[in-house]
Amino acid sequence: MEETLKQILSTLRQVDSRLGGLEHGQNQLNLGQKKIEKGQRNLEQGILRLENRQEKLEGRQERLEHHQERLEHRQEQHEFRQKQLEFGQETMQKNIVSSLGEFTDHIIEHVDAKTSALNKHLYSVESTIHRLSRQ
């Protein structure tokens, strides 16, 4: 019977040794799980910081898009004004040419009228001189 008790004791020591190994393994697993949980919390905090930064970037992007729309609107206004100026300049050049032509015509008419009047007056003077020289 002593032999049987020794075997049982030996088996119990082996079981006890195995349980000690299992307990050590369980402690290692608990430690690993705590590290994983800490890492998960760090990841969650990092995700929150990234989301916050993303929101800020989206706000900045919206402001940039708004500024770009305003710049495009201003550019359209400048292009419209430039076209108006070009049209006005073209019209003014046409008007200048037309006005110069009209003024030239008026000057020619005036010179012709004065020349005609001078010719009539000269004819009258010549006629008078001829009449006087005949007498």
Image (cartoon, rainbow, N blue to C red):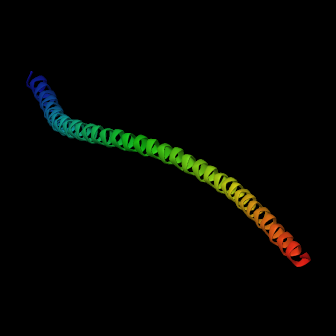
Counting every numbered tag in the picture gives: 0
Which is more toward the observer, 92 or 33? 92
**Looking at the image, is 11 positioned above or below residue 131?**
above
Given residues 119 and 65, the one toward you in this image is: 119
Residue at (53% x, 44% y) in the render: 80
Q: Is residue 134 left or right of residue 8?
A: right
* Residue 111 quadrant: bottom right
In this rendering, position of residue 135 left or right of residue 37: right
Which image quadrant for residue 122? bottom right
Residue 55 x %, y % = 28, 37
The quadrant of the rendering that contains the N terminus is top left
Task: Answer with the quarter of the image where residue 24 lies.
Answer: top left
Q: Position of residue 8 (x, y in %)?
A: 13, 24
Residue 67 against residue 130 in the figure, above or below? above
Q: Give the residue furthest to the top.
A: 1
Question: Could you say which is closer to the camera, residue 69 or residue 27?
Answer: 69
Relative depth, front residue between 63 and 12: 63
Q: Residue farthest to the bottom?
A: 133
Residue sitting at 71 percent across and 60 percent down? 110
Residue in the image at 49% along x and 48% along y: 78
User: What residue is shown at x 64% (from left), y 52% (from top)?
Assistant: 95
- Residue 115 at x, y percent in the picture: 77, 65
Q: Residue furthest right?
A: 134
Quarter of the image with the C terminus in it: bottom right
